[in-house]
Structure formats: C-alpha cells, structure tokens
Image (tube, helix red, strand yellow):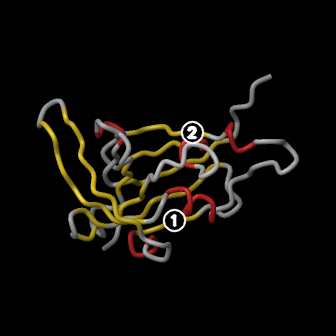
Amino acid sequence: MSRSLALGGDLTRPARLTVPDLLAWPQQTADVSFECATSGIRHHRFTGPLLHGVLTDAGPGFDPVRRKDRLRFLIAVSGADGHRTLLSWAEIDPDFGRAPVLLAVTLDGTPLDREGPQLVLPQDRCGARHISGVDAIRVDGGYAWA
C-alpha cells in the first residue's frame, strides 16, 4: 500500500498523490551527500520529479496582474514523523533560485511506495531540510507586505 501526500493551500487543483502518482512527472536523479552532525557524511542516490513541476501542475494561485507575485509564496512540507520545513517559491523557481528540489520516489534504487516520497534538497550541505515520508505540502501566498 502506498502512502499519500496532500497538496493543499493556495492551489487551484489540490490533490492527494502517492509515489506511483509521482512517476507521471519527468524523473530526475540526484547523487546527494549530506553531512550529518551525529553520523558523518551520508551518500545517497534519489530519483523523483522536481517539486516545482508538481506544484506548478497543481496551479498555484499567483495573481497574473501583480508583478512577481509568486515571490511571496511559501511552501510548507511535513513528514509523517512530525519533521517540517519551509521553502520559498523563489528557491525552486527556474527564474530565480532554480534549486533542483525533488520529491523522491526512490532511495538508492529502492522504491519508496510504503514509506512515502521524500523531500530532497541536493544543494543543502546538511540534511536537516530532508523530509522522509512526506504527508503534506501546503502552498501559501498569504505573506504579502503592506
């Protein structure tokens, strides 16, 4: 049985996705080294779609009239174990940070159907923003400054 993750927030097409669902997007591979304070350097190979592609297909609620509206959007990611992290849309947007953040569907060649997808930030030196068993991703554009 595959675990699912809920895509919600400021999206025109919120969804529940499983690892098999995530195989519908183009797959990327990332060889990642994380430096962990307690266990040293860990090397892994992940495959999965880019987070940007999955969220773009869900229809983020950008206001087309407001110049660069997407820059005010935040992405909250949580795992089944309670681990959470926050990213900005600008980090993953190809016009800005272009971070190749993955929703991994395999870890070292092993499918993650039972565990659920993993959030992988290959550019991070430390693996603290790596989330195993992602169960929710919320896109929120409510962070406008006055």
Give 9 or 31, whichever is nearer the viewer. 31
The residue located at (29%, 40%) in the rendering is 127
Q: Amino acid type of disc 2?
A: Ser
Lateral position of residue 18 relative to residue 71, left or right? left
The reply to whether callout 2 and callout 1 are in contact (CB within 8 Å) is no
The residue located at (54%, 42%) in the rendering is 91
Give 84 or 68, whichever is nearer the viewer. 68
Quarter holding the N terminus? bottom left
Dot 1: within a 10 Å radius of its alpha carbon, few (fewer than 14), some, or many (20 or more) residues? few
Give 41 or 10, whichever is nearer the viewer. 41
Q: Residue 109 falls in which quadrant of the image?
A: bottom left
Give 36 or 98, whichever is nearer the viewer. 98
Real-space Cα distance between discs 2 and 1? 22 Å
The residue located at (71%, 60%) in the rendering is 12
Mark 1 — residue? 16
Lateral position of residue 145 relative to residue 124, left or right? right
Dot 2: within a 10 Å radius of its alpha carbon, few (fewer than 14), some, or many (20 or more) residues? some
Secondary structure under tag 1 reads strand
Nearer the observer: mark 2 or 1; the answer is 2
Query: Up-down: is 116 above or below 62?
Result: below
Mark 2 — residue? 88
Q: Amino acid type of disc 1?
A: Arg
N-terminal label among 2 and 1: 1
| Residue with the most extreme right position | 65
